[in-house]
Amino acid sequence: MAEAFWDASSLVPLFLRQQSSSAALQLARQFGVVVWWSTPVEVRSAFARLLRMGHATPAQFSAAQVDLAQLRMSWREVLPSLALRDQAELFVDRFQLKAADAQQLAAAYDWVLGSPAGRVFIAGDVQLLDAARQLGFQAIPA
């Protein structure tokens, strides 16, 4: 199975029902998951926010955490480094990205060793997808 870099925003719909859940599940059947080191924190933050907002029940919240833990056993994780942090700093200067999104993009760029042509980047954030596309990734919305 081919691998793709998955932004945290593209993973949440795999675990909690959202408009993009069908598309995300289809992509999960096509691509293995590569993520940034802090993705679990971002995903769990989204779970907690959806629970607080009433968009998830306590049972759905618990099931999502279990499913996330299961996926974590099979995904590949890009670890932090000084070079990756430096790249993220350059990306916040170059693109209109929040810090966490710049780190996600820098992790994806590190994963492909600076050669994104033909590699897949999946995200639910339009600005992040646009930046990935400008770098040469095949950017797919989830």
Image (spheres, rainbow, N blue to C red):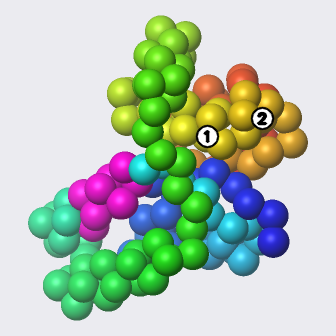
Left or right side of 49 for 35:
right
134 vs 117: above or below: above
Kindly identify the residue that appears in the image at 66 percent across and 72 percent down.
Answer: 28
Query: Nearer the N terminus, badge 1 or badge 2?
Result: 1
Q: Is label 1 in contact with label 2 (beta carbons under 8 Å)?
A: yes
Kindly identify the residue that appears in the image at 49 percent across and 63 percent down.
Answer: 11
Res 25 quadrant in image: bottom right
Q: Quadrant of the N terminus?
A: bottom right
38 or 141: nearer the eye? 38
111 vs 130: above or below: below
55 or 71: nearer the eye? 71
Kindly identify the residue that appears in the image at 79 percent across and 45 percent down.
Answer: 119
The region drawn magenta spans 38-47
Indicate the secondary structure of the residue bearing disc 1.
helix
Give the residue pinned by disc 1: 108
Return the residue found at the far front: 82
Magenta: main secondary structure equals helix
Res 113 quadrant in image: top right
Q: Residue 118: give x, y in percent of width and height.
A: 86, 42
Return the residue found at the far top: 93
Q: Amino acid at mark 2?
A: Pro
Please give the label number shown on residue 116: 2
Q: Amino acid at mark 1?
A: Ala
Mark 1 closeness class: few <14, some 14–19, many ≥20 residues within 10 Å: many
39 vs 94: above or below: below
Q: Residue 142: give x, y in percent of width and height.
A: 60, 57
Membership of 46 in magenta stretch = yes
Kindly identify the residue that appears in the image at 45 percent across and 83 percent down.
Answer: 70
Q: How many marks?
A: 2
